Image: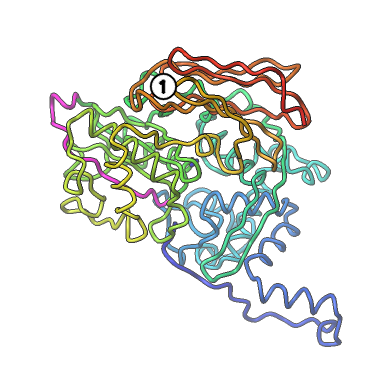
Amino acid sequence: MRARLRRSAVLLTGALIPVSLLMGNPAAATSAATSAADPVSGAFARASAAHEVPRDLLVSLAYAETHLDGHDGEPSASGGYGVMHLVASRTLERAATLTKRPVSALRSDPAANIDGGAAVLRALADETGLDAAARKDPARWYQAIARYGGSTAPDVARLYADTVYDLMAEGVRATTPDGESVTVKPRAVEPDRGAYAKAKDLDGPSTLAAATDYPQAAWVAANSANYAVSSRPSSDAIDRIVIHVAQGSYAGTISWFQNPAAKVSSHYVVRSSDGAVTQMVREKDRAFHAGDYNRRSVGIEHEGYVSDATWFTDAMYRSSAALTRNIADRYGIPKDRTHIVGHSQVPGADHTDPGGNWNWTTYMNYVTGGGGATNPHTAESVCGTGYQAIDSAALGSAGTVYLLYNSANGNNCVATIKKTSIGTATATSAYLEVQGKTRVTDSGNFAYYAGPVRAAAAGTCVKWGGKAGSSVYDSPFEHCG
């Protein structure tokens, strides 16, 4: 895709009251009342106007980073602060220079932090050459958004920006730690990716690499400074699985593990929204994630923050549990809480993750209850938030292929969900063909599903289908509305 520490309020001290307000100017009075009642919404509105950054884009970026929680000025794992995740030694200091605000305020004051993030985003837009007319078009901000994320790897920068635009398309309905509601209405935007259009799409079918240890994972290598090459399990037996919470976003965590300064990594990262999995260290190698347990364990990071349960979705629990079950089966690890542990349970650990908001009962039920016979994935979880199934076709007893539609952005999606050989990589495929365009297919040996295959198809007929086992389904051109 891909949580929290606690809260800080917006302080509006020392403000001068305009004479117009004292004189009873209705518009000014309404604006001031709205700002006082909804301080975070007001801060986004002011920052958007001051720096000419589209408001909905600004909110979507903040939600992708932090779910609009400033964590009381405490940093993320990668050193990011506040709602806008201003990162020390990068965007934090730049925001201070641009806004003339002290770093301490940018860390802890939500309004200052939002203004700082908007200022940095505007500066990045200026560097990409956006003029006043272009700044009004959210589609033209893509390259600035990608650079804001901080990754030097084009594929990870694209993943970061795509997440922001996906959120804007789906809409955002967030509640701040102080109970304020902040929303973005669904708005489909076809982003102008510029040079990032050539970067690998980490959410695309082609990134499910056969070389990964887990068939459903995408592959993005961690920096070699952040793990140790080894030859496990021959060198060291693997008998533990360690559950982490990243204290950061999915794309941000992947980027952090690619940074040689991090000196940390995990084998896998799981996204909150849909349970997507990226592998970053081969299981034979020792990821730096759990101190004394590095030699004996596989580490799984989960997007989010320990103090915010909103990150821990059912899609994340199911996907992570399927991964844990797969690892446990391959290494003969008992599926119990002695062998599947939180980071906080590792001897000598000074971490608290996954924390009290992590539902171990639900998670372990998914780990043990499936028993390899039930697919933990659904077509909706594979395609992502906003997609609803509008048609399906049975592929014998081997699986079902689904056609889904997202009314917010006009996109269709096709996914084939296996019903037999669950957890074992077998030939499975899914395809989607928009009339007049080239067919897109995801085909290979997959353990749980093929897809997602997505395409914009509002008002256009589509042909769709897939294969599982020996059964194949091919639709005619249909669903033309």
Q: Position of residue 148 (x, y in %)?
A: 58, 44
Q: Position of residue 200 (x, y in %)?
A: 54, 24
Q: Which residues are magenta?
A: 231-247
The residue that mark 1 highlights is 446
Most foreground residue, 455 or 200: 455
The quadrant in which residue 84 appears is bottom right
User: What residue lies at 54% left-to-right and 67% top-to-bottom?
Assistant: 105
Q: From the viewer's perspective, is 476 left or right of 339? A: right
The quadrant in which residue 233 appears is top left
Is residue 172 depicted above or below 216 in this figure?
below
**Quadrant into which the C terminus falls:** top right
User: What residue lies at 71% left-to-right and 36% top-to-bottom?
Assistant: 410
Marks counted in the figure total: 1
**Dominant secondary structure of the magenta stretch?**
loop
Give the residue type that dot 1 points to: Phe
Q: Is residue 244 magenta?
A: yes
Q: From the viewer's perspective, is 305 left or right of 343? A: right
Q: Position of residue 220 (x, y in %)?
A: 42, 29
Q: From the viewer's perspective, is 280 left or right of 174? A: left
